[in-house]
Image (tube, helix red, strand yellow):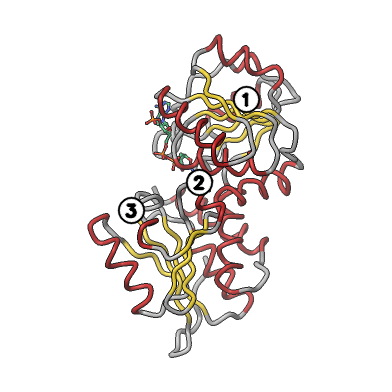
Amino acid sequence: MSFVSKISGTTKVCGLFGDPVEHSFSPAMQNAAFSSLGLDYVYVPFLVTPADLGQALAAVRALNLVGVNVTVPHKEKVLPFLDELAPEAEIAGAVNTIVRQGGRLSGHNTDGAGFLRALEADAGFAPEGKNVLVLGAGGAARAVSAALARAGAREIRIAGRTAQKAAALAREINERTRGRARAIRWGEEDLLEALPDVQLVVQATPVGMHPRPEDCPPFPFQGLQSGHLVCDLIYHPPLTKFLARAKAAGARILNGLGMLLYQGVLAFELWTGVSAPVEVMRRALVEELHHQSSSK
Ligand code: NAP
């Protein structure tokens, strides 16, 4: 487990705003990265309730923090408190990383870019010209769809439990990017019809996540073959039921650990201006995953 060796008057402070924060993997990952490079930084989790979000953001300035990550339930609500938004945050309509420069706060979204980097680095997959099927229409689906559209995916087909949300997300992608998206019905027949010319499937719902690993979203696994790459954005457990069934059907699989890693890598680089020690951060995440799995 990583630890911070020395905190002094010069230590720079980053952190995480969320509710809850106690199971976050980010403190272990970021503090391991700071220690391994000998950087005088520390990363602290802050439990911030929705009612206190404005005051917490004022404190980023008042307490001279370098920046913070933002997680559930604040990723969208934080926007009005920021001075500027990076293009990917504007398109996603959500922020997961804030950087303070003097008195100004800029909002970034490294989730989408982190997902793209995981696809490329951990699965050798380039989205340009590919058709993608996304299951779910929440915040993660939005960040991933926007990033895929910007990276030149051919068509993004979005299946959501709530049809209006999937339709709204597809409309936003079409309006805000040069990409093409459409909503499809989440039913066996429609998914089977969509799969043959799809190369990437992204499971972006929380179904199957710890503490309910026995759950699995309904999906026609018989429509998968070796040409499909199937990603589940969940990383705890590392092998969800969804991924296990996709693998058994012959598809290549990728879990959400790479996305978590690379969104953190990009946040680290925004705060420090230094290349992140990727393998140190990956090891810290895997250790934290083992630690949390064995202590439940
Ligand atoms: P969210 O904003 O709450 O959205 C969840 C989506 O899943 C919604 O579209 C919701 O449908 C759908 N959903 C929920 N329960 C469902 C069910 N039983 N059947 C079908 N659809 C269901 O959550 P999020 O932030 O997008 O997170 C989604 C997942 O991605 C989580 O597991 C999260 O841990 C993971 N994630 C991973 C990373 C990473 O770095 N690897 C980053 C972000 C998120 P409705 O709209 O109908 O409610």
Relative vertical location of residue 240 with respect to residue 219 in this rendering, above or below: below
The kind of secondary structure element at disc 3 is loop
The kind of residue on which mark 2 rests is Ala
1 or 2: mark nearer the eye: 2
Extreme-top residue of the structure: 189
Quadrant position of ligand 1: top left
Residue behind mark 3: 20
| Most foreground residue, 172 or 227 | 172
**Image point (49%, 68%), residue name:** 99
- Real-space Cα separation, disc 1 to disc 2, in angstroms: 28 Å
Q: Is there any visible trace of residue 286 in the rendered image?
A: no
Residue 165, how many percent across, how many down? Answer: 42, 29
The kind of secondary structure element at disc 1 is helix
3 or 2: mark nearer the eye: 2
The kind of residue on which mark 3 rests is Pro
Relative vertical location of residue 228 with respect to residue 111 in this rendering, above or below: above
Q: Tell me which numbered mark, 3 or 2, is placed earlier along the sequence.
A: 3
**Image point (58%, 47%), residue name:** 112
Residue 235, how many percent across, how many down? Answer: 53, 43
Q: Is residue 169 left or right of residue 265?
A: left
Residue behind mark 2: 92
- Real-space Cα separation, disc 3 to disc 2, in angstroms: 22 Å
Residue 248, how many percent across, how many down? Answer: 65, 22
Residue behind mark 1: 246
The kind of residue on which mark 1 rests is Ala
